[in-house]
Image (spheres, grey):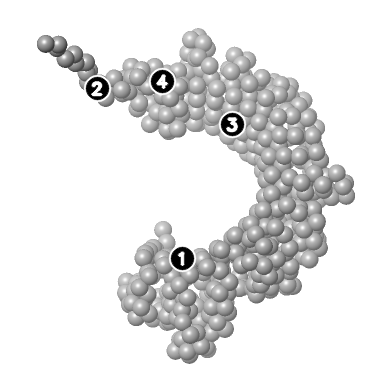
Amino acid sequence: MEKRRTKSRTTRTPQQSLDDLPTELMHRIQSLLSEQESARTCVLSKSWHHAWSTIPTLRFPHFIGSSRETKNNELVYKTIQRYHENDVPIETLAFEYFVTDPGYAKSCFRHVLSSKTRSCLKELSLKGCNFTGSMFTFADDLLFSGEKLQTIQLNCYRIINPGINPVIKCASLRVLVLKEVNISEDVFHSLLSTCSLLEEVRLDLCEGLKTIKVKNLNCLRQLRVTSYEEDGLLEIDNVPSLGSFYYQRRCVVRKSHLPFKTTDSTTASSLGRSVTGLHLEGMIIDSTFFDMIESKFPFLESLELRSKGRASKRYVITSPLKRLTLYMKHGLMGLQVYAPNLLSFEYKGKTLPTLLFQANAPKEIKLRLNLRNPVGTSFFIWLREVLNLSSKFDIHIEFSHDDGTPFSSNGSVDVDDLRKRVLFPVTNVQLLSLDYFIDLGDVFREHTRAFDAFFSIFHPTRVKLYGFYSKSLCKLTVRGMMENNMTDLKDVLIKKPS
């Protein structure tokens, strides 16, 4: 009789399963954790302890450029020295620093960003402040010298300069982020001309850059510029892959001024062929502005405009847009949109404009209204008409006027009359958010009329209430929902301000 052979099965413990993970996976997990959480993984096993001690990602908070406080600095020095002695590569280095002693700080940076550190470095992130009255300048060959560098992020507040004539040896650079960095135009343009593989460039309130020339970057996909310069100029040429373009001007502009040079036909055509996402903020928006958008960016899919000016005219937008966002601080009188592919529309302002979609209406509309003045019956009738434009709405309304009542002072809103004029409430509002910035005090019963008016024209699926709400108001609000037979209501959130 032949005996059946059976294979012996060995039971693996959780400890063995943890040890069998590849070191690269352990490094990946630890890099996604905070410094403290990453250090705690050392107790799991010897393999995890070894992975933590050789992780190629180093983050050091509170790196202090002062000879009086050296405790944290010594930890940084010893860690980097251990990596160098054991030939462990440092691929990501990030730290925060505070310069109080310029001479000592320079020696610290020279020690940390040595040539051996930069030989394997792929990502460098520095965030710091200069607390001295004098200019602090990085050594020329520290920041932009690394053959393997792919990402550089500098957030340098209070007159910190990357050098007058820095040595630029980072031809592999893909991402460049400069925030509040004092950098000359010559250095910046030399950096762009050297790093031809750049895919993303972000400039946020950088001093010294009045004219920004972004040219001959075939791989550039994202460009984001935030500037204080009222007369600044952005020249873009030969960027065939640019898909996302963000420009914000943080200054008072008294005249319409385009943020980029359009007299060059090459520049215009280069942008028009590639840009699908455009965000413009801080400029005067008028009819010529929309004409420019239509002519220079004919293939836009996403457009976001933010303006603090007064738009007293009715504007027309014609474009194959899929997403349109308008933030008008002082409101918009009227808007006519011809966009057959439009999927979503978002509007934020003080008044509700007249909206007209000549082609297919967007599937989703978001309205964010900051009501500085009490509203009357006409507001609710107008809102009810707008709700016929789409199958899905999100509505957020902020009441921030001084008298504390959402209605006109003469009490012109008659809820009973409103219900007679509105044949039936619609059910296409997914979310209604009401936000009060004022203390309701003893007038909460008056505010329940606002809810009755809203619920008379639509029945939302979810309701969020923010502000100074009393328990009595909450009870009356819920009771009003029940009286209006809001059977589709799924969620109510009532939250007081922190």
Indicate which disc, 2 or 4, sits on the residue closer to the N terminus: 2
Indicate which disc, 2 or 3, sits on the residue closer to the N terminus: 2
Q: What's the amino acid at mark 3? A: Leu
Identify the residue position indicated by label 2 in the image.
13
Indicate which disc, 4 or 3, sits on the residue closer to the N terminus: 4
Q: What's the amino acid at mark 4? A: Pro
**Front label number (4 vs 3):** 4
Indicate which disc, 3 or 1, sits on the residue closer to the N terminus: 3
Helix, strand or loop at label 3? It is strand
Alpha carbon distance from label 3 to label 1: 43 Å
**Front label number (2 vs 3):** 2
Indicate which disc, 1 or 4, sits on the residue closer to the N terminus: 4
Residues at marks 3 and 1 touching, judged by CB atoms closer than 8 Å? no
Quick check: 412 left or right of 235? Answer: left
Alpha carbon distance from label 4 to label 3: 30 Å
Label drawn at residue 220: none
Crowd class of label 3 (few under 14; some 14 to 19; many from 20; radius 10 Å): some
Label drawn at residue 126: 3
Alpha carbon distance from label 2 to label 3: 42 Å
Identify the residue position indicated by label 1 in the image.
430
Indicate the quadrant containing the C terminus: top left, top right, bottom left or bottom right: bottom left
Residues at marks 1 and 2 touching, judged by CB atoms closer than 8 Å? no
Helix, strand or loop at label 4? It is loop
